Every structure is written in structure tokens, then in C-alpha cells.
Amino acid sequence: MNNHIFPVIGHLPVAELKPRHFIDLLKGIEQKGLLEVAARTRQHMCNIMRHAVHQGMIESNPASNLEGIIAAPVKRHYPALPLERLPELLSRIDGYHQGRELTRLAVSLTLHVFIRSSELRFARWTEISFTNKIWTIPATREPLPGVRYSSRGAKMRTPHIVPLSQQTIDILKQIREISGDQELLFPSIHNPSRPMSENTVNKALRLMEYNTKEDVCGHGFRAMACSALIESGLWSQDAVERQMSHQERNSVRAAYIHKAEHLEARKAMMQWWSDYLDRCREEFVPSYILGHQQSKV
């Protein structure tokens, strides 16, 4: 708001704001090439003006119906390794000694649970139930003092359930030996009340001699897991989508989706993925072959 909204329309009374003001503001941001910022600003302004309507300050929302005024942000594609290179990746993770052990475990955990960076960085021990073998990422988190965006929880703004495989539990227990007395799973080495850097996982991958702009990045683990799960043929795409925590495009259906939808299938899915990673440590096995073998059992 300080960078883009206030300098342009901050001097105007709310009642004097017209659609033209918001259009000009958004076009100015768009011309700077900040398409994602422009999209977020449009939504933010719409919410503010909606609140003004609710408070009786104005009769209608002048910031509504501005869809299509600016170009849509270009979706970012994150690099991911082909599954054939899983043995190499697993070997490099196991052999990572260029940094602290907690960093290696963060990379390993990311591969097993394929959650998003902020979901991992700001994770608290209170979210994890070893008894139920469940990690529940809340919609929002208690913000950490002085840490931007630390209130971020699950990206879709609804609680996200991550069933924990036995391998994932073993990794978490190793992490607990290091940071179990802290609030955060991955505290900063310099200040345990703050989280590890958002670049920690990708920096570790670069030290493993991966180009995180071309070969693989932490977010790319999600694409790798998704590919293997779909190609295995063992689960419906809908169940995989639920575990990936992808946004439901059908707004009516989204309102009725429960966080635990397909949970039993997702428990089996997460254990299968960890088992598949173990199977690929020595030699790559196509996921569809392993899935075909298991479907006959």
C-alpha cells in the first residue's frame, strides 16, 4: 500500500474514488512490469472498498468489476528433474555435508511431503501429531515478531492435511533432536525465534551442483511427486490434486471440499511416495511399472 496505493490515491477521500482512479493506478503498476503486484493490488483495493460499503461510507464498490483491466501474471514454471534422475538426487541429498544437518533434513523432508516453501519455513511443532501421523498446516499461523509473511499457512487459505509416511516420521524425529526445544521446526542458525531463510533449500541444491533455475528447485519437487503419483495409476487425479493442495477451479465445488477429502487414499499415497523414493535409491524404477505391480497384489 505504501509503495503503490497511497502515493497515487492516498490523498483522496474514500467517497471521491471512482473506477477511473483504480484503473489508472493498476495501469501504472502494470507498466512497470509488476503483473503479480498489480493483481494483488486489485484484489486488495476491492476488499478495502467492499469494507467501506459495509461501513456505510459509500453506496457501491468502485474497485469491483476490474477483471481484465490489466494483463494476467505469467505463471511461473519451476524446474524439476525427470524422475529418471531420482537416484542421483537422493544420493546428493544423503551426501550433503556443505552445510548444517538441519538444512539437509529440510531438503529431504521437502522431497517427501512436497509442500510449499512458506508452509515448510514457518512450520511449528504444534502442527505435527506423531500419534496420528498427520501434519495439519493451518490456514494462517501466529505471526512471528518482525518476520514478514510469517502468518502464512496453507496457500489455499484452508487447513491442509499432510499424512506422514514412516520415512517422513523418521526424518521429523531427526529434526526434533535438533530443534525440538524450539517453536519452529527450522529455526535460523543465528536467531532461533526466526525461521530459516527462504533460500535455504535452493542454496543447498546449488551446493549439490544443481542449477535451481534450470535443473531443479525446492518447488520442483512438487511436480516430480505429482508426475510419479499420476503415472502410477494407483490414485485418481482428484485425490492427487487434494494432496497437492491445488486450487479448486470450480468455485461451487470448492465451497464443499473438506480438508480431509480422500484422506485414506492420501495416507496410502504418501507412504507409497516415500517407498518409491527408497526403491529409487539404487536404481530408477518407472512409477507406472511399480504401480502396475502393486495393483495386482
Image: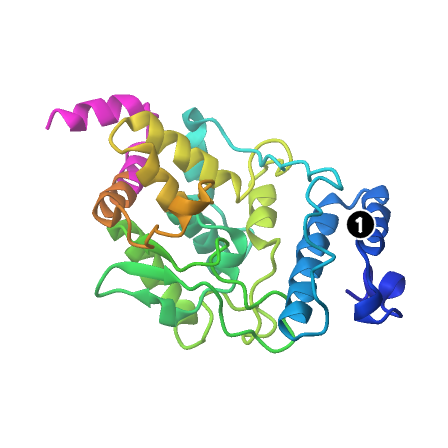
Q: Look at the image and give the residue range highlighted in magenta.
A: 273-297
Expressed as whole percent of the image width and height from the top left, the position of residue 218 reads: 53, 44
Expressed as whole percent of the image width and height from the top left, the position of residue 166 reads: 24, 52
Q: Does the magenta stretch include residue 284?
A: yes
Q: Which residue is drawn at 40% across and 60% down?
A: 159
What colour scheme was applied to this rendering of the protein?
Answer: rainbow
Drawn side of residue 32 relative to residue 215, left or right: right
Is residue 30 positioned above or below 62 on the image?
above
Q: Is the magenta stretch mostly helix, strand or loop?
A: helix
Expressed as whole percent of the image width and height from the top left, the position of residue 55 reads: 65, 75
Is residue 258 positioned above or below 15 on the image?
above
For residue 120, say whether it is visible.
yes
Q: In which quarter of the image is the N terminus?
A: bottom right
Q: What element carries label 1?
A: helix
> Label 1 is placed on what type of residue?
Leu
For residue 281, say whether it is visible.
no
**Quadrant position of residue 227:** top left
Q: Residue at x 58, y 72 (%)?
A: 194
**Quadrant position of residue 151:** bottom right
How many dots with numbers? 1
Q: Residue at x 58, y 36 (%)?
A: 78
Q: Quadrant of the C terminus?
A: top left
Q: Name the residue under label 1.
A: 26
Is residue 56 positioned above or below 61 on the image?
below
Drawn side of residue 61 relative to residue 32, left or right: left
Expressed as whole percent of the image width and height from the top left, the position of residue 21 reads: 84, 55
